[in-house]
Every structure is written in C-alpha cells, then in structure tokens.
Image: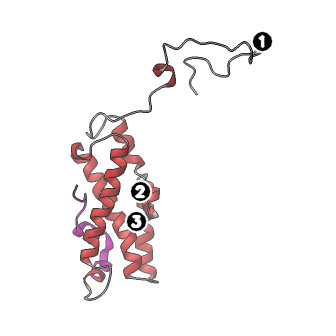
Amino acid sequence: MAAYAAQDDVLARAGRFGGVFSVAGKRPNLADLDELLVTVAAIIDAEILARGYDPALLDATIEEALKDVNAWAVLVRALPQATPGDDQADAIVEQGREILKAAGFPSLAEGGSDLFTALAALEAGEGGGGAGTSAGSLWDDFADVEETRDAATVAEDAEPVWLRGQSL
C-alpha cells in the first residue's frame, strides 16, 4: 500500500528545515523521505492488519489521521539525522514527538509502531477497515462446558475463583 502522507507533508512540518533534505550529497535526502514514508506506512498497515482490519477499506477520516501520523513519524526519524545538534531542529522533532504521543502513538514518536488511537476508532466500528477480529470471551466460547469440580483436588467448602459470566 502507498504511504498515507507525501513528501510535501513532511516538508511542511519541517518548516524552515525542509530545505536540508534537498542539499546535494547530504543524507537523508528527498529520496530517503520517500522511502521512509513507505516504510512507516507499511508499519501502520501491519498494525491495522494485525488487529483484523483491512487498510484498503479505511475511510477518508482515518486516512487523514494516518497522514499526519505518517508525516510526523518520518520527520521525527529524518530531521535529527539531517541536523545533528541543532537546537531549533530538535525543538521541531520534540514537537512532532509530542503530537504523536498526544494522538496516541507514543511508540512511533520514539521510532516504534503502535497505533492505538486509529485502532481504537476501527475497533469501535468507525473508519471502515472491515469487520475486525476479537479474542472472544471465555464465557461465550465455552458456554456449553459444564462446571465441574475434581473431588480429589478441591476441598468440599472451596469456592471457585471465578464464576461463569463474571467480568475479569
């Protein structure tokens, strides 16, 4: 699947530092940004698929939210490499990290891959993505199993630790 964001989205968030990616012979460059956009989008897609949703079925609102996450996650990875030790660039990176954390993506802020906010929306039935999957319920999945006690190992007055239907 293609990236949710484009190079221009990353450069817009970089502000005056956007030009550092166009310096001849310097890395990361614009081609690296394009590669990172696709890599981060693949991480996003993998997380969505792992929850049982189809990234190809996402609606525009979810894709727009993921565009911002995709662009900031790329900038958080690329800008420190392009501007080592620059306090103003570090401030932009920190802003990006805070935005990712506030949006529910703390791991992406640090280079990881969790996507709790968008996944929570999908799990709530919003944003497309298909039906999704669930771990199910022990009580529903084994509703036909009789409650039994092994007389040899359970004392006569012992109570079960959990009762059928009890919320854990």
Q: Is residue 12 visible?
A: no
Between label 1 and label 2, give the one nearer the viewer: 1
Return the residue at label 3: 96
Q: Residue at 28% across / 57% down in the picture?
A: 67
Q: Callout 3 environment at 10 Å: few (<14), some (14 to 19), or many (20+)? A: many
Q: Quadrant of the C terminus?
A: top right
Residue 157, percent from left and from top: 77, 12
Between marks 1 and 2, how big is the CA–CA gap? 49 Å
Return the residue at label 1: 157
Return the residue at label 2: 113
Q: Is residue 38 visible?
A: yes
Tell me the magenta residue range.
1-19
> Magenta part mainly helix, strand or loop?
helix
Mark 1 residue element: loop
Q: Quick check: 106 above or below 142?
A: below
Q: Name the residue nearer the viewer: 149 or 80.
A: 149
Between label 1 and label 3, give the one nearer the viewer: 1
Q: Callout 1 environment at 10 Å: few (<14), some (14 to 19), or many (20+)? A: few
Mark 3 residue element: helix
> Is residue 8 within the magenta segment?
yes
Q: Name the residue nearer the viewer: 15 or 42.
A: 42
Q: Quadrant of the N terminus?
A: bottom left
Q: Residue at 43% across / 55% down in the picture?
A: 105
